[in-house]
Amino acid sequence: MNYLTVENISKSYGEKTLFENVSFSINKGQKVAFVAKNGIGKSTLLKIIAGKEASDGVGGSVYLAKDVKIGFLDQQPELILTHTVREAIYDVDSPTVLAIRDYELALLEPDNNDQLQTTLNKMDELNAWDYEARIKTILSKFNINNLEQIVDSLSGGQQKRLALAQLLIREPDFLIIDEPTNHLDIEMIEWLENFLSRQNLTLFMVTHDRYFLERVCDTIIELHNGVIYKYQGNYSAFLEKKAGRQEQLAQEVSAAKSIMRRELQWMRRQPKARGTKAKARVDAFYVLEKKATQEVDEDVVQLNIKTTRMGSKILELHNVVKQYDDLKLVDKFNYKFKKKDRIGIVGKNGVGKSTFLNLMMQLEKPDGGKVVKGETVQFGYYSQEGIQLNGDKRVIDVVRDIAEFIPIDGKGRNISASMLLERFLFDADHQYTFVRKLSGGERRRLYLLTVLMKNPNFLILDEPTNDLDLMTLKILEEFLLEFKGCLVVVTHDRHFMDKLIDHLFVFEGEGKIRDYPGNYSQYREWLSQQSNTSDVATAKPTQKAAEPVTAEPAKRRLNYKEQMEFKNLESEIAKLEKEKANITNQFNDSNLSNDQMTELSLELGRITKSLEEKEDRWLELSEFA
């Protein structure tokens, strides 16, 4: 059954076109993710589908199946701020939910037995007990405990979790959600993954969480250069099929460029197209020109900013204690940072992760112990509270306020503020846009730039992945892998953490912090193994590195046959690369016929595929060489 059909919808703001003539459909049971670069209008598209915003013009349309109940979660949820949490949760037109609300209220008045009995009878009549248990499960998973709290007193993250819980409780047929994992801790995300993976649920969402895309989605829709591409499968399948599409496009563009050069010579010899055949050839030339000038490669964020030299003394925490009233967040924590430390911080919301970062930065004083910073340490602090860019400033002025020229290496080379912005995908026109007109992801990218351009040697990143598009995330990861200083990251993005972190500070509550030697996936595996041991219930967490459960196996070595294969692969790869270069050069011959061009394209594809297979095998064997 078709739930949604989108046909030729477009959206512009002033002179800026977000998307044009977008079309796709979603069937019942599909779990679809929508991916695109920041600023392309992902959130706007979701609002149009949910009926919260209108598309441009009269040609586009959005068709939703009749009697399909839609649930929409915006990045900025619409809640009645004067309501209590209880009123927000139970503010729904459902007899079952209303019966549960009345029952919950009756429990608060134990002296009114008649009212309580009435609500009990109503609960029995509607068979609402299972539903009530489900509601309590959802609330507990999102750490929503105080139902009498006023919504306006909640933080932005708490309001987002409340809106998400409200949405799931209503049980819509078709969920449309924008960045559902923002403001959730990792345990909440893993529970939500399992919830959304149910077979009978239909889903359309925007998310940058790659593990979420991998484990929940069965279809990915990409908007790139104004064209919609639909990929069946999860995130891994998307990457594989997209790479294949780009490779094929590169071959087609290369062939088109070669043909265009020959046709251009003909065009220059023809001042006017007098005959029908000549006119058709001229028309074909302009079609060919459009194809030959397509952009093949994605825009690339370039991060190569200089890192300040770091001395031997970095940052030391000695018996640090921090608590608020009876809530103990840090209890006698000790750690001496070493060069190139790469630490991830995980734990439930509210256990003190952000407070710990402020202690490291010496923005807050500990209640006991001390924090000692080395003289050469230059912090770069990306915090949620720090994203307070002046909306009335232009993008270029935000950067120029810090520096007009920025050093990019230790050889005295500088780069202008404008050129640096171009490397961060803010082109010349975009640089003079007011900050208030940027998307959420674009603002975060700009804020990240202002942090990095101060040449830090100790990076502290508090949820840096929120709202960043997949491409920017990938480039940021590559930059951080090469970063020579210390790195501390608080993030709910498990893929990001697994790729960058080599040990964790795990906040376990009541001030206890475990220093675990490994990334997040290894920690989860260790936890699973620990839960199967008989003494795990009585074992107390310590601040020492966790011991591995089993000894690491000895590294496998290549046998003789594999050694010979590994050696031969190097020469075979070099030979294939030479053949590939030779064929690529042949495309420059303007005398090639169409048949010859086709034959060369097929041969280039065969060589490229063989080269990739041999390179993959070489990488596989190199791990044991």
Image: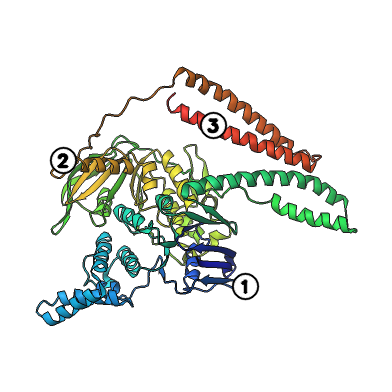
Label 2: how many Cα within 10 Å (few below 14, some 14–19, many 20+): few
- Asked if disc 3 and disc 1 are in contact, CB closer than 8 Å, the reply is no
Q: Which residue in the structure is indicated by mark 3?
A: 615
Residue, x 30% and y 29% (percent of image)? Answer: 552
List x then y, in percent, for residue 281. 83, 54
Q: Earlier in the sequence, mark 2 or mark 3?
A: 2
Q: Quote the CA–CA distance across marks 3 and 1.
A: 49 Å
**Residue 41 appearing in the image:** no
Q: Is residue 501 above or below residue 1?
A: above
* Towards the viewer: 377 or 528: 528
Residue 55: image quadrant is: bottom right
Earlier along the polypeptide chain: callout 3 or callout 1?
Answer: 1
- Tell which circle, 2 or 1, labels the residue nearer the N-terminal end: 1
Residue 262, percent across and down?
80, 45
Location of the C terminus (image quadrant): top left
Q: Position of residue 585 (x, y in %)?
A: 71, 35
Badge 3: how crowded within 10 Å, few (<14), some, or many (20+)? some
Q: Residue furthest left?
A: 111
Q: Amino acid at mark 3?
A: Glu
Q: CA distance from mark 2 to mark 1?
A: 66 Å
What numbered label is drawn on residue 59? 1
Q: How is the image coloured?
A: rainbow
**Residue 322 placement (x, y as % from top left):** 18, 52
Q: CA distance from mark 2 to mark 3?
A: 47 Å
Secondary element under disc 1, as helix, strand or loop, is loop
Dot label at residue 485:
none
Residue 14, can we see it? yes
Residue 534's mark? 2
| Disc 2 residue type (three-letter) | Ser
Amino acid at dot 1? Gly
